Image (cartoon, coloured by chain):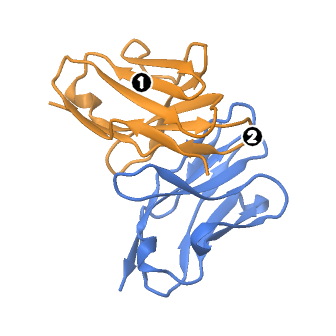
Chain colours: A orange, B blue
Amino acid sequence: GAVVSQHPSWVICKSGTSVKIECRSLDFQATTMFWYRQFPKQSLMLMATSNEGSKATYEQGVEKDKFLINHASLTLSTLTVTSAHPEDSSFYICSALRDRGNEQYFGPGTRLTVT
Amino acid sequence: AQSVTQLGSHVSVSEGALVLLRCNYSSSVPPYLFWYVQYPNQGLQLLLKYTTGATLVKGINGFEAEFKKSETSFHLTKPSAHMSDAAEYFCAVSDLSDEKLTFGTGTRLTIIP
């Protein structure tokens, strides 16, 4: 099966610092990766769509300068939360799409806590 | 625009009883429909999906769902609940145009011993 990993699985950072989260497709090349945010006991909200070699497409209301997404290769996308604040604390989940019309494979998530 | 409604944020069933989790959707185009399961502090695992063809879809762990276009529903069922089924379940819809998934608010399933 297709495996997607995320690193780190959890991170605690101080307010004002930046945090980078990696999403890797381990055994397939992902044409597209997605980044979601999940608040406690709530659903997943799509933040942005990331295509290899091009700029990410952000959903309405998501600050692109705060949530920097880089999709440098077909197996790696990164999300950098810049100048993090406590309200950015959340569970961040990525998914990878192998081919168009195929299913999304989800990573295990990264729990970010900003103090 | 697409949307998903999951009736019942919490569902409790006895071990061995029927599991029924409800999902209704709205979509302006023929939808692709999904059910995902999420265990605590983990990502999502696909249970089953409907794209085209047979409207009764069988998934993993004994779950199945039926696409009913006339009712715009895609309810998830399992004949006999197991303790390991306790988790959060999400229904989702997408179309082929952009592959984006729109999730419902989720249903937390509790299994009573």
Chain letter for the residue marked with disc 1 in the picture:
A
> Residue A64 vs residue B113: left or right?
right
What residue is disc 1 on? A79
Residue A101's disc is: 2
Nearest the eye: B13 or A27: A27
When asked about the image quadrant of residue B68, the answer is bottom right
Identify the residue at horizontal 46%, vertical 72% (top origin): B85
* Vertical placement of residue B90 versus A58, above or below: below
Classify 10 Å Cα crowding around label 1: few (below 14), some (14-19), many (20 and above): many
Asked which quadrant contains residue B99, the reply is top right
Instruction: Specify the amino acid type for callout 2.
Output: Gly
Does residue A68 lie above or below B44 as drawn?
above
Q: Earlier in the sequence, mark 1 or mark 2?
A: 1
Q: Residue at x 49, y 88 (%)?
A: B16
Q: Could you say where residue A51 lies in the image, as x and y percent from the top left? A: 61, 22
Q: Secondary structure at mark 1?
A: strand
Check disc 2: other Cα within 10 Å, few if <14, some if 14-19, many if 20+: some
Look at the numbered disc 2 and give the secondary structure of its residue: loop
Residue at 25% in and 21% down: A84
Closer to the camera, B45 or A39? Answer: B45
C-alpha separation, residue under disc 1 versus residue under disc 2: 24 Å
Please name the residue shown 63% across and 54% down the image.
Answer: B34
Tell me where residue B51 appears, x and y as whole percent: 77, 52
Q: Percent position (x, y) of residue B49?
A: 68, 56
Q: Quick check: A99 left or right of A72?
A: right
> Residue B46 location in percent, x, y?
58, 55
The residue positioned farthest toward the front in the image shown:
A27
* Amino acid type at mark 1: Leu
